C-alpha cells in the first residue's frame, strides 16, 4: 500500500561508513583552476588500462601495477585509492595525485518490508539520484539512474514531474552500481545479477555517459550484456545507436499506449517520435540480432486499460516479438490516477497470452519506501520543473513548452 511506512528501516548517511576516499583530496587542483583529476570509475577498461599503463610507465613501475590497480577498481571493495593495499604507499600517493576514485555519496538507504533496498545518492553539486536493489528468487536486480531528474515529462512519472537537473557522468552511473553492489554484499543480499536503467532519467538522452557505462558494467565488472536492460520511452536515434553495438544489451520500450493518439497524451516525446516510426525502429533492432525487446505497459484505470486497446497492443507485441510487462500504475502525488483493477490487469494478461504473446504482471515492489521511479527524490525535493537542454539529445527530443505535466 502506498504511504504505509511502519516497517521500513531508514539509515541516515551519518551512520554509514564513509563512501568517499579515506584520504580525500580536492577533486580539482586549486593551483590549476579548471583541471580535475579523472575518476577511475568513469573509464572503460580500455581507457583505464591506457591511462594506468602510461602513469606507471612514467614512474618506472612494472607493467603489472596497472592491472593490479584495475583489479581494485572492478573488484569494488576498495572505497579509495588509499585502500589499494598491495600497492606501495608511494604509488598510492602518486595515483591519488593524478586520479580520483569517487563514488556517489550515500544520502539515505531505505529497506522495504519486501526486501527491496533503495539508495539515495548525493552527487557533486547537490543533485540526488536513486538506485534500487530488488531481490527475487535466483536473482538480484539493480535499477539505476542515468540523469538527475528527467526532461521528458511523462504524465504518470514522478521523475517527469520533478524536472531535469543534469546529466549523470559515466562515473556516476557506474558508481551507483559499484556502491550498491558492495552494499548488497555487505548486507547479505548476494551479488547483483541484473542491471536495469529504469531509475531516474531517460538513458538514451544521455548516450555520452550511458554508452561507456554499459561497457564498464559489461567488460569492467563482468555483467553479461543480456543481463543489462536499457529502458527508453522511445528515443529513436538512441535505439538505433544501441542496435549498432555488438554486445546484446536488452531493450525495454515504455509503451504505455498502443495507439499514437493516446500515447501522445501520456508521453510528450510521442509527438517527436511517433509509434509507427518507433515500431519500425524496433523491427530493425530485432534484425540486428538475438535480442529480446520488452514492452513496459503501466496500467492506469480508465486511461489506458480499455479492452479495445488489447488488440492493437497484441498486434504491436507480435510485430516485434516483444515480451510484455504489465505494471499496475503506482500512484504519484501529481495526478489523480489510480492503478487498473486487478481483474482488468488479469484480462490483459489473459488476452495477451491467448494471442501467444509472452507476458508478466510486475508486482509493485518496495512501495512502502517509494521505490517506484523518482518518488523518494520527488518527495524530498518537490515541485521543481525546468527544461534545461539535454546535452546529447537533440532539442527535438525534449518536450515543448506547454506539453506534459505543468
Ligand atoms: N526513461 C526510461 C526509464 C525510466 S522509467 C523509460 O521511460 O523507460 C522506468 C519505468 O517505470 C518506465 O517503464 C516508466 O514508464 C515506469 N513508470 C514511471 N512512473 C511510473 C508509475 N507511476 N507507475 C508505474 N510505472 C511507472
Image (cartoon, rainbow, N blue to C red):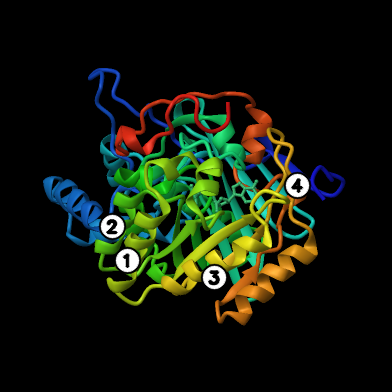
Local SS, label 1: helix
Q: Which mark is residue 240?
A: 2
- Seen in the image, is 5 located left or right of residue 154? right
Indicate which label's residue lies in the foreground, 4 or 3.
Answer: 3
Res 89 seen here: no
Q: Position of residue 334 (x, y in %)?
A: 68, 33
Q: Residue at x 74, y 52 (%)?
A: 339
**Which residue extends farthest front?**
308
Q: Which mark is residue 285?
A: 1
Q: Which picture quadrant has residue 215?
A: bottom left
Distance between mark 4 and mark 1 Cα atoms: 34 Å
Distance between mark 2 and mark 4 Cα atoms: 34 Å
Between disc 1 and disc 3, whose residue precedes? 1
Between disc 4 and disc 1, whose residue precedes? 1
Indicate which label's residue lies in the foreground, 2 or 3.
Answer: 3
Distance between mark 1 and mark 3 Cα atoms: 19 Å
Between disc 2 and disc 3, whose residue precedes? 2
Local SS, label 2: helix
Res 228 seen here: yes
**Which residue extends farthest right?**
6
Answer yes or no: do the residues labelled 4 and 1 have beta carbons within 8 Å? no
Indicate which label's residue lies in the foreground, 1 or 3.
Answer: 3
The residue carrying mark 3 is 314
Distance between mark 2 and mark 3 Cα atoms: 24 Å
Answer yes or no: do the residues labelled 2 and 4 have beta carbons within 8 Å? no
The residue carrying mark 4 is 338
Distance between mark 4 and mark 3 Cα atoms: 23 Å
Q: Work out whether residue 317 or residue 208 is closer to the camera in this orientation and state it.
A: 317
**Compared with residue 317, is residue 338 higher up or lower down, i.e. above or below?**
above
Q: Position of residue 125 (x, y in %)?
A: 46, 25
Q: Residue at x 24, y 56 (%)?
A: 66
Amino acid at each position: 500500500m502506498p504511504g504505509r511506512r511502519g516497517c521500513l528501516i531508514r539509515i541516515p548517511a551519518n551512520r554509514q561508513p564513509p563512501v568517499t576516499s579515506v584520504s580525500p583530496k580536492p577533486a580539482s587542483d586549486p593551483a590549476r583552476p579548471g583541471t580535475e583529476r579523472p575518476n577511475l570509475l568513469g573509464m572503460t577498461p580500455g581507457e583505464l588500462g591506457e591511462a594506468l599503463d602510461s602513469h606507471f610507465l612514467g614512474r618506472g613501475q612494472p607493467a603489472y601495477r596497472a592491472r593490479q590497480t584495475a583489479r581494485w577498481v572492478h573488484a569494488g571493495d576498495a572505497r579509495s585509492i588509499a585502500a589499494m593495499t598491495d600497492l606501495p604507499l608511494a604509488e598510492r600517493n602518486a595515483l591519488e595525485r593524478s586520479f580520483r576514485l569517487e563514488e556517489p555519496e550515500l544520502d539515505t538507504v531505505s529497506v522495504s518490508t519486501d526486501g527491496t533496498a533503495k539508495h539515495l545518492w548525493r552527487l557533486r553539486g547537490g543533485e540526488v539520484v536513486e538506485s534500487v536493489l530488488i531481490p527475487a528468487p535466483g536473482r538480484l536486480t539493480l535499477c539505476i539512474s542515468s540523469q538527475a531528474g528527467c526532461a521528458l515529462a511523462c504524465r504518470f512519472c514522478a521523475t517527469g514531474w520533478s524536472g531535469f537537473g543534469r546529466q549523470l557522468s559515466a562515473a556516476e552511473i557506474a558508481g551507483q552500481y559499484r556502491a550498491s553492489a558492495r552494499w548488497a554484499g555487505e548486507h547479505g543480499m548476494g551479488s547483483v545479477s541484473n542491471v536495469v536503467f529504469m531509475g531516474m532519467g531517460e538513458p538514451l538522452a544521455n548516450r555520452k555517459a550511458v554508452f561507456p557505462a554499459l561497457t564498464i558494467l559489461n567488460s569492467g565488472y563482468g555483467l553479461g550484456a543480456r543481463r543489462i536492460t536499457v529502458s527508453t520511452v522511445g528515443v529513436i536515434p538512441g535505439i538505433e545507436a544501441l542496435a549498432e553495438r555488438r554486445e546484446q544489451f536488452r531493450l525495454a520500450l515504455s509503451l504505455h499506449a498502443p495507439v499514437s493518439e493516446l500515447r501522445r497524451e501520456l508521453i510528450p516525446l510521442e509527438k517527436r517520435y511517433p509509434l509507427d516510426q518507433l515500431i519500425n525502429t524496433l523491427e530493425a533492432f530485432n534484425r540486428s540480432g538475438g535480442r529480446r525487446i520488452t514492452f513496459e505497459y503501466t496500467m492506469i484505470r480508465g486511461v489506458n486499460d480499455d479492452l479495445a486497446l488489447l488488440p492493437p497492443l497484441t498486434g504491436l507485441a507480435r510485430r516485434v516479438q516483444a515480451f510484455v510487462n504489465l505494471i499496475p500504475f503506482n500512484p504519484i502525488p501529481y495526478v489523480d490516477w489510480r492503478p487498473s483493477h486487478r481483474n482488468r490487469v488479469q484480462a490483459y494478461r489473459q488476452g495477451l497470452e491467448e494471442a501467444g504473446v509472452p507476458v508478466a504482471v510486475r508486482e509493485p515492489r518496495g512501495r512502502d519506501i517509494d521505490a517506484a521511479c523518482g518518488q523518494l527524490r520527488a518527495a524530498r525535493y518537490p515541485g521543481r520543473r525546468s527544461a534545461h537542454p539535454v546535452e546529447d539529445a537533440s532539442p527535438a527530443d525534449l518536450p515543448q513548452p506547454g506539453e506534459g505535466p505543468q
